């Protein structure tokens, strides 16, 4: 785009342009198996979807870590803003699962030959998510204590605790989106390799189905039941 000036490339690094040098595209685009080593050409589809999920999860974890700082500072609005990004990252991972259903079961069996004993349980992104999520619950509980309010009261008197209430809702969004990812992933697994079989590390597929609705923040789900029981006593007349 020399006609607009500033066409001179000023960054150092590999690649012809500052775009390539900053984003390290030569390195990035060499991280997928090349045709000469493919056991099947869908290794590219499989690798791109998994690698991009790892990148989105890397961003999600970084945003969670910063949101933890904001919760500790009692800056709930900032924490919610960051958690919205986390939720987008998880939703993108779920959307990406869709293209894997365009991998036919037999094609996947060929791709699988290249995977060794690689298993999603060893995904660095999901492992990091599992590591940081309990810290969110811990900091949220501390914030409740410092506002001297119970979770049930927060859900009734939310107008006087808007920031903390919005944080509670952002956290349950994270939980719901992780459940949605697991539900869609389980269907992709069923559609691709079936149910009564084992994964590449020997895990029965039923195990993946069994953890679909695992709750990261059980108290935030439980409080809904408590509100219903309370409403039965205090609000209903029938
Ligand atoms: C054709 C697509 C896919 C198939 C057939 C598949 C298959 C499986 C199977 C069989 C398991 C059980 C563990 C084992 O491998 O033995 C598993 C677990 C897992 N996979 Fe996948 N997977 C696919 C795509 C993905 C993608 C795109 C991701 C994103 C990183 C992913 C992440 C995970 C995770 C995190 C687990 C642990 C269980 C959980 O947290 O729900 N998988 N997968």
Image: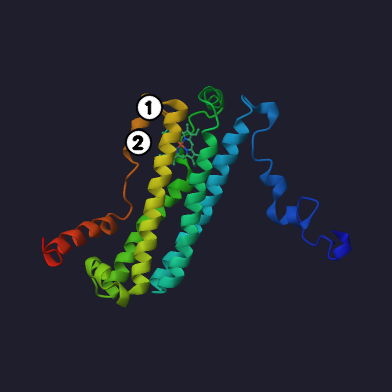
Residue located 51% across and 45% down the image: 95
Residue located 39% across and 41% down the image: 183
| In the depicted structure, whether residue 16 falls above or below residue 204 | below
In the image, is 146 to the left or to the right of 27? left
Which residue is at the far right? 3
Residue located 41% across and 56% down the image: 132
Label 2's element?
helix
In the image, is 31 to the left or to the right of 10? left
Label 1's element?
loop
In the image, is 35 to the left or to the right of 105? right
Q: Looking at the picture, tell me which residue is in the foreground, 154 or 232.
A: 232
Q: Quadrant of the C terminus?
A: bottom left
Residue located 60% across and 40% down the image: 48
| In the depicted structure, whether residue 85 falls above or below residue 34 | below
The span from disc 2 to disc 1 (Cα, nearest Å) is: 9 Å
Circle 2 residue: 209
Q: Counting residues from the N terminus, which is met first, the one under dot 2 or under dot 1?
A: 1
Residue 198 in which image quadrant = top left
Residue 164 in which image quadrant = bottom left
Q: CB under 8 Å between callouts 2 and 1?
A: yes
Question: Where residue 195 is drawn, which disc sits there?
Answer: 1
């Amino acid at each position: 785009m020399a006609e607009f000036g500033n066409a001179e490339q000023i960054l150092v690094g590999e690649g012809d342009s500052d775009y390539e040098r900053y984003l390290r595209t030569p390195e990035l685009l060499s991280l997928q198996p090349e045709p000469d080593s493919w056991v099947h050409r869908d290794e590219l589809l499989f690798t791109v979807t998994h690698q991009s999920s790892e990148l989105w999860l890397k961003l999600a974890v970084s945003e969670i870590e910063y949101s933890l700082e904001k919760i500790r500072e009692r800056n709930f609005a900032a924490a919610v803003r960051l958690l919205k990004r986390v939720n987008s990252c998880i939703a993108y991972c779920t959307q990406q699962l869709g293209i894997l259903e365009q991998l036919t079961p037999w094609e996947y069996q060929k791709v699988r030959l290249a995977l060794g004993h690689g298993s999603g349980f060893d995904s660095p992104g999901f492992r990091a998510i599992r590591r940081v999520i309990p810290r969110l619950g811990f900091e949220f509980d501390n914030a409740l204590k410092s506002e001297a309010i119970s979770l049930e009261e927060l859900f009734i008197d939310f107008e006087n605790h808007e920031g903390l209430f919005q944080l509670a809702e952002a956290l349950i969004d994270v939980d719901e989106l992780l459940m949605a990812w697991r539900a869609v992933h389980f269907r992709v697994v069923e559609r691709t390799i079936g149910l009564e079989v084992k994964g590449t590390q020997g895990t029965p597929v039923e195990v993946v189905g069994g953890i679909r609705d695992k709750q990261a923040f059980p108290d935030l789900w439980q409080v809904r039941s408590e509100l219903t029981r309370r409403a039965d006593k205090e609000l209903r007349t029938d």
